[in-house]
Image (cartoon, helix red, strand yellow):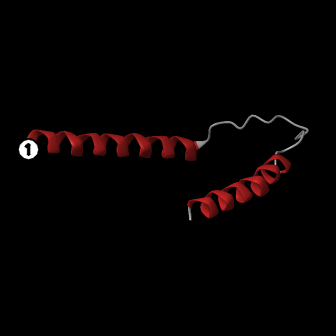
Amino acid sequence: MRFIRLLSVLIVLLVLLPLAGVCQPGDPGGDPDVPITGIEFLLGGGVLLGIRKIMARFKSRNDKS
């Protein structure tokens, strides 16, 4: 059973890895840098608030123990 699973994983990898290489972008022909816009600031703020909430939850769990 393990051999069949290993063989199937190897086949999938051998099929998908060359496909990933073909999907790489070529020369975009312009300035590839993207400026940070408002949505990136909102996403970053949301991540920081989420991390703060998770840390507070773990801290309150450790205090109860």
Q: Position of residue 31 (x, y in %)?
A: 83, 34
Query: Quick check: 1 above or below 22?
Result: below
> Which quadrant does the C terminus fall into?
top left
Residue nearest the viewer, comparing 45 with 14: 14
> Which quadrant does the N terminus fall into?
bottom right
Would you name the residue on which mark 1 appears? 64
| Mark 1 neighbour class, 10 Å CA radius: few under 14, some 14 to 19, many 20 or more | few
Residue nearest the viewer, comparing 15 with 59: 15
Q: Position of residue 60 (x, y in %)?
A: 15, 43
Q: Residue at x 73, y 58 (%)?
A: 11
Q: Residue furthest left?
A: 64
Q: Residue at x 50, y 46 (%)?
A: 43
Taking 60 as reference, is 34 left or right? right
Q: Position of residue 57 (x, y in %)?
A: 22, 46
Q: Position of residue 35 (x, y in %)?
A: 68, 36
Taking 55 as reference, is 45 left or right? right
Q: Secondary structure at mark 1?
A: helix
Q: Residue at x 87, y 41 (%)?
A: 28
Q: Residue at x 62, y 59 (%)?
A: 3
Tally of numbered tags? 1
Name the amino acid type tagged 1: Lys
Taking 29 as reference, is 12 left or right? left
The image quadrant that residue 29 belongs to is top right
